[in-house]
Amino acid sequence: MFSITLKLMKKSARMLIPAGIAILIGTAFIAATFLFGNAMNDALAAQNTAQLGGANYVISPDSGKDLTDKDQDYIYTRTVNDFQLDRIRATEGVKDARASYAGSVTVTRGNKHASSYVITTAAKRTLLPVTITQGDQPADSNEIALTKSVADQLGVKVGDRVTVNSQAAQYAGKTGDSAGNTGDAGDESAQNADGTSSHDGDSDAASGASVSSDGANTADSGMTVRVVGLTDDPNGAYAYYGGASVLSDNVITAMAGSNDFGNLPVYLVYLDIDDASDTAAASTVKQVSTLLPKHFSVQSRAALVEESVKSMSSGETSITTIFLLSFGILAMLVAALVIANTFQVLVAQRRRTLALLRTIGANKSQLYVSVLFEAGVLGLIASALGVGLGIGLMAALCQSDLMKATGMTMRLVLSGPVFTVPMAFGIIMTVIASLGSARSATAVTPLEALRPIELTDTRRVGVVRAVISVLLIVAGVALCAFSVWQMSENIAGRDSMADKQYPLVLLAAIIGCALIFLGLVLSATFWLPVLMRGVGAMVALAGPSAKVAHANIQKNPRRVAATGAALLIGVTLVSTIATGAASAKQTMNEALTTRYSVDMIAAGTDMTGKQASEAAKVKGVQRGIYAPTRMMTMKDADGKSLSVLVVGVDGVDALRKVVRSDLSGVTIDGDSVLMPKYSAATGKDIPLDKSVTFTAGAAEAQADAANGPSGNDANGSAENGNGQSGGTQTLTLKPRKVDYRRIASNYAAVAFVDASHFTNGGIKADGHIMLMRIDAEGAGVALNDVFTNVQNVFSASAGVTVTGPVAERTQWETMINGMMALLVGLIAVAVLIALVGVANTLSLSVIERTRESATLRAIGMTRGQLRRSLAVEALLLSLVSGVVGVVLGTLFGWLGSYMVFSLYGDTVFPFEWATNGVVLGVAALAALLASVAPARRAVKTPPVEALAEA
């Protein structure tokens, strides 16, 4: 029987190819997913241990032990001296030891500034986590090996001298505190453990390095060092910072605000131990262990790599792999619908052959096993090819170095699951998809060998399926309605489950959408043919070809429903993601617009008027005003001290050009000050007396220090501590409150006064600010380009920062667009398989209707009309399913957006015309292309020959 099955497969090879392609694509995706997960784990493990450099052992805190808070405090307050580095280096078998300490500095040459992450040096290059590409590593005092990017930015080469400075060094210099005050510097591993925190520290250190406590530019008052080498970071140890520079011990000590390298806090020490002999290495490790503080031990590099992989994985499967694998499974489920269609027609076409086999002695079980065996062989061959394709695609990705942009170097890592899981899944899914057809094969009786072949499926759909579908849809609608109700109650400020159990409410909405979608897919046999019949009835009016297509599409509603459901799944998911992404961007844009009254600001102590003029000329900057500023303090009506940035403007008319707020009826003169209604620090109303007094100078610094974290900006209070006027300055004005928001979020409030207060010497400016109104759309440029170009204008001034809602909007859009592109790309695999299913359905329909097509040709239908009928049939299948998918996806996207983004502001419910139009256009084009091969088959056979063949 097996040999007969193989012969039947060979005869039906052309029909099996589309189903095989569907399996191949799905299994290739799954195999590539596992390979991608392996490569990611390998790259991340290498990156996480890249800071070890050439170290094969590490001194680190004990893990897996119950440590008290006191023990933790002890661990993280150890210094270099506590590790007795000299004795460790003198231990037999220890080649070198490097204490791990890092921080951020500003490097200056002339009028150019650059921020750089810096690490400690080592006696041997091999122990450094970065590569010295030119020159040498710092060995003597006052030396630095710069990252190549910083060197290029400053125009520096080996042998030149640069100035380095840091916030901690400046603070220590002004206060005389040199007892190891580290400022923003810290252990490099601690910094990298929290990317966001370390980045913030880096930025603060960079700005602090060029702005002293009195606001003056003190970049030249740093430490002059000689550039002895250039570094590269090939392993991505410091990819977040663009690499790391290496400092000699005395320089990094000074940048930490200390005068003794031994006082620097560390909790990691990297060792290069001679491990040529395991016994000797173990002996060395034992000797080193006796020199360590308590709660510290020596760990091998191999053990650290193993821990790193475990920390990124759950049950030996990375989160990334699980995420991507879900899309592979989705692709295989869609492929299963295609496979099921294929085998239904195969069995229908072979009814006479199967009946003849029954006549000559084959029993029902043999026919059942025959169909399953055929499915298994098809699944095995297609899955094996799919695994090979997946490996090839991943190998090409690794060789193309596309991932280097992320700071990772990926390599092809094969493993058992790469082969076993896709092949097992492909075979099992193919066999499961053929079970219904196998049961149909057993229903064939010997008598049917004498009957004409009837290929249409006239079986009624089971009542059980209808009941289950309705129950699923009703339950899904109920859960979605409940979730929306709870969210609306929460937004209205009433008691709601969403207030305390928001994750459960969100989960209920997700489950509700899933149940609705599952119910619709299960019941597609009922409603999708009816929908296509209605649309087809209108299309049939277009002519004979359309009328034939309409009639053909009604012949097998079950297959039409299965094909339409396959495409429905992919289009719905794409539309859901596109709608959610569009809603996220628009909702966050609206939220940012209400939270900020100025599109973009640039502020700093070393901003120049020339830079402001250049920024105003940037394409997309509609208007801008350049104004002097002074950091001052005031007390509100409750006696609370507030940090206020006082800005001098030429009347309220100038302000109206850039501030998005109602300024009607407001004036700014020499006796008045324009104040915000709400504090940027607390969001609460600022109570004001009939007059307010602003103070700048020594008293301001004392007030800031006394009040602590009251919304004051730490850097701001330091800048004004000295008072550039040489003493305390005060200014008493009548306040006028207007509801404008977050002009500069670093301050509790931004107050606008007449510019004459700055020109007549009443207030000594310690900086400048540029307020800008942006119209990127009107200028025909991308918002990100406007932001980047404005940043470039101020890049020569280390003390200038560019912020505002445009910056946050750009970050949001970049992140959302990246996620959307990834998800849509993944789901596109399912859409591709569904379109293969459309081609498969048309091919099988042509084979079924060989006699019918021949008859139509015989009575006068031309080849062109026959081709057009198949094209119309393909378009009906694709577009009707696609439009339903777009509608469902949009509704699901709106619901998801409401559940998530209503927490941040008024949710926007957009219809993503562009993405949905592209999806439908691609589906239509693919459907037309899918109809080409079946049409060629239908028209190339002469009518007489086709009638004889049928």
Image: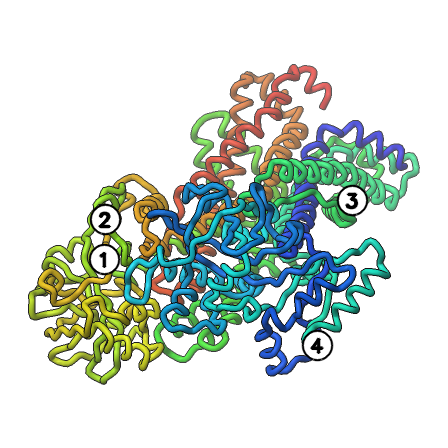
Q: Give coordinates of residue 179: x percent, y percent.
A: 48, 74
Badge count:
4
In the picture, measured across the screen, residue 124 lies left or right of residue 381, that is left
Mark 2 or 3, which is nearer the eye? 2
Q: Secondary structure at mark 2?
A: helix
- For marks 3 and 4, the one nearer the N-term is 4
Mark 3 or 4, which is nearer the eye? 4
Q: Can you identify the residue that label 1 sits on?
A: 768
Q: Quadrant of residue 690?
A: bottom left
CA distance separating discs 3 and 4: 59 Å
- For marks 2 and 1, the one nearer the N-term is 2
Q: Can you identify the residue that label 4 sits on?
A: 65
Q: Can you identify the residue that label 2 sits on?
A: 612
Q: Quadrant of residue 642?
A: bottom left
Q: Give coordinates of residue 844: x percent, y percent.
A: 66, 32
In the picture, measured across the screen, residue 111 lies left or right of residue 235, that is left
At label 3, counting other C-alpha atoms closer than 10 Å, the crowd grade (few under 14, some 14-19, many 20 or more) is many
Name the amino acid type tagged 2: Ala
What residue appears at the point 79 percent right and 40 percent down from the top-left corner?
380
In the picture, measured across the screen, residue 767 lies left or right of residue 89, that is left
Label 2–label 1 contact, CB within 8 A: yes
